[in-house]
Amino acid sequence: MKYILKKISTLIVTLLIVSALVFFAFSFIPGNPAITKLGTQATPEAIENLMHEMGLDRPVVTRYFEWIGGILHGDFGISYSYNQSVTSLLKEKIVITMLLSVMAIILTVLISFPLGIYAARKSDSKLDVIITSVNQFIMSVPSFFSGIIITLIFGVALKVFSPGGFVSYKQSFIRCIGYLFFPSISIALPKIAMVVKLLRDTALKEADKDYVRTAYSRGNRTRAVFYKHVLKNACIPVITFLGMAFADIIAGSLIVEQVFSVPGLGRILLTSISGRDYPVVEAIILLLSVFVVVSNLIVDLLYKKFDPRIHV
Amino acid sequence: MKDKNKRVKFIIGCVLTGLVFIMMLSGIFYTPFDPMEMDPSTKLMGPTLSHIFGCDNFGRDIFSRVMVGVRETMLVAGSVVIIGTLVGTIVGTITGYYGGWLDEIIMRLNDAVLAFPSVLLALLIIGLLGGGRNPLILALGIAFVPSFARIVRGEVLRIRNLDFIQCVKLYGASDLRIIFVHILPNLKTVLLSSVLIGFNNAVLAEAGMSYLGMGVQPPNPSLGRMLSEAQAYIFSNPLNAIFPGIVIVMMILGFSLMAGGLEK
Amino acid sequence: MSMLTVKDLCIKVHDRKTTDTLVYDVDLSMDKGDILGIVGESGSGKTMTALAIAGLLSRHDMEKSGQIIFEGINLLEVERKVLRKIQGNEITMVFQEPLNSFNPLKKVGWQVEEGLRVHTVMDKCEMKERAIEALRDVELSNPEAVYNSYPHELSGGMRQRAMIAAAMIIQPKLIIADEPTTALDVTIQAEIVELLKRINKERGTAILFISHDLSLVNTLCENVLVMQNGLVVESGRCENIFNNPKEDYTKKLISAIPKNPFYKG
């Protein structure tokens, strides 16, 4: 219990540091958002007025704490470019990006585990060689390129979906998921390949260990040895990897969203960065950090549950 | 039988990497067409004898642009790996060797940066500095340092605790001497594999970032950007997007196959 | 008919180009309740012989020839299904490194029960009872606690006792112990050997004891095989070999035993 508390407090500290870094970093860049908004022809008074309105004339540190205070109430400020509350701007997009990432993780686990187990059990068979080679190949394809290929094959050629035809979950959840399936596969593909390789390699390494020999000496058949002993041990590095992969998947979704025109956090993040819309950028960065840190925490806890050797 | 497999992989890797290298090297001196030259008459043309990869929506020869783009990617990826290795080794060696509160603080910072997706980090930094090749190198370099630092630190810790270091210390060797003469040379193997993997990841990262428009700015060609530009025309000429992508895959696949062959 | 007869056992390893013979023409025989020791340095082939008898040498690059006849069945020629019925049931094994030989992720009790789980149909409670009984039999003072612990939570001696409990739980005819004491402290070594002696006396379980430690072998075994470089150099009753070694190698081994007043041998 104490361990969990300690981890959560580290989590909060990390988030505070990240938020502070992001906030202060943006305050130091040259370029005044008020000027950007009004244009270079604006009068000094107009600029001052706007700055006062936006709260930009107050000291950075004060603004930071006001921002944090606002967040605790669910208020992320007002977008410079869109003039609406950041919360309302991002609400839907967060859900979409999260849907995409979660689908990608689920697909990864669902596809890679059976493949990895199969490759481990039938190692050195022809199929195993094929799986390993295909793996290597897939790991070399960037997710946005596989996204383009998938669009070409399934969107243009086979017309299974229409590229750019995103359906919001508000209209139809099923069709939304159906559309998101293809971008999730693009994101998941390299991760699937990595997990298959990791699972297979680890399982084979474990199979050489002494306790496996003991299991055979007790008269277990090969299948029993694999599932009762080898697999659980082999899963440990895989879980660690999946935890790290989640952060990558979130990042990957930002890019793949562009390929499939999915209105998630990716597009607005990019436009906000180039448009110097700091409240939006800060909010998105903070949110994504929260997801990354929380998922790391979950992985850590799961890890503890799986491996009794780790001391609290 | 296993070794033959490995050798085949290695050869394929060399061939692929070799092809890409030749493309890049010859691109420095000669390209079939001027990569920037727009020719309205060849808009979105498919592959022909003179335009091997076809032309993009501005009529520019894709093959020539790819040659320059590959150079761009290699430059960025190479620089990123160099920065990551150098800074990472320095940080990792100092924290690994001296330990103490310095180690604690730096490692906390390191882990925080590491946990953060590198794409996001790079996006942020580029957002602060603006797009272009140098900001991209800086951004990705910073994003890559933590993983190198962590690996180096782990190795330094391991070596530092080996018996022969204790022996050398007993003889009165200074810290600097120990670091430079005994520890650093032993980092070779670990660094080599990290550099190879890092290079692949750097190529992927550069492609991704330039796809998002954060890399070198148009009209300079970069492979990722060419992909994003070609996307809009995917219905008219899908090959526009495929060729730069294939070259990216060749680079990464070739390199990892070569690296795999060298390993065992 | 003796329980176990090994005749002309040869074990060869095939590399890509060369073939190495690890064990040449080994002969041995054991009756019910015998205690046989195999003694030799590392690389003498003793472990290989033991593994072959236990049916654990199934790597594709190992060629085994000869006969290993256990209760009338030739273990080298029989199909895997039949072999598996014997493994962990009538022939069980105790390994050298109890930490690595246990699955680090499963509780010790679960692993002690494993023989029962594979070969019998018992419900969970029964198996647990038998396991705790077995753990008590191997002189562990708090068997329930040991049942619920993980391997890394026990000391080396306790682990090895648990390993023996696992081997004993199914009342095997033969326990093959491959250097069971090598990884343990000297005092614990003696205790384990005493434990094995007691098991043999009380249950009539035959023990094949592999070791490089002659004094331990002398304490425990009635008969002994001396191996060097894959060959059986000398064999016979322990007292005869120790007091009257015929071969030079045996003489060297005996003279290398440290003279320690605490050793019984």
Image (cartoon, coloured by chain):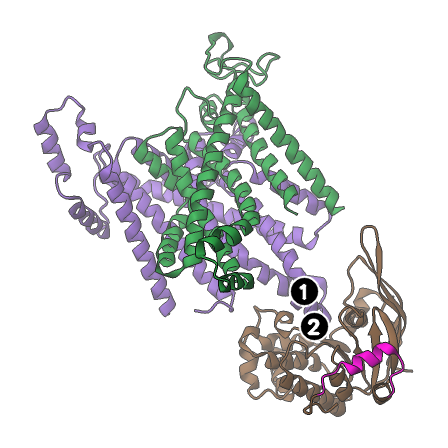
Chain colours: A purple, B green, C brown
Per the image, is C250 magenta?
A: yes
Q: Residue at point 54% right, 62% down?
A: B162
The residue segment tinted magenta is C244-259
Q: In the depicted view, which residue is nearer to us: B51 or B147?
A: B147
Where residue A82 sits, quadrant-wise, is top left
Label 2 sits on a secondary structure element that is: helix
Residue B125 locus on image (x, y percent):
34, 38
The residue singled out by tag 1 in the image is A224
Question: Is C66 above or below relative to C19?
Answer: below
Q: Subunit of mark 1?
A: A
Residue C94 locus on image (x, y percent):
70, 76
Q: Residue at point 46% right, 9% down?
A: B40
Question: Is B223 above or below relative to A90?
Answer: above
Residue A147 locus on image (x, y percent):
50, 34
Whether tag 1 and tag 2 are in contact, CB under 8 A, the answer is yes
For the view shown, which residue lies furthest in the top direction?
B41
Residue C221 locus on image (x, y percent):
79, 86
User: On residue C221, which mark appears?
Assistant: none
User: On residue C118, which mark appears?
Assistant: 2
Q: In the depicted view, which residue is nearer to us: C252 or B215?
A: C252
Q: Is residue C81 left or right of residue C137?
A: right
Q: In this view, does B261 lie to the left or right of C205?
A: left
Per the image, is B46 magenta?
A: no
Q: In the depicted view, which residue is nearer to us: A122 or C50?
A: C50
As measured in the structure, the alpha-carbon distance from the residue carrying label 1 to the one carrying label 2 is 9 Å
Residue type at numbered disc 2: Val
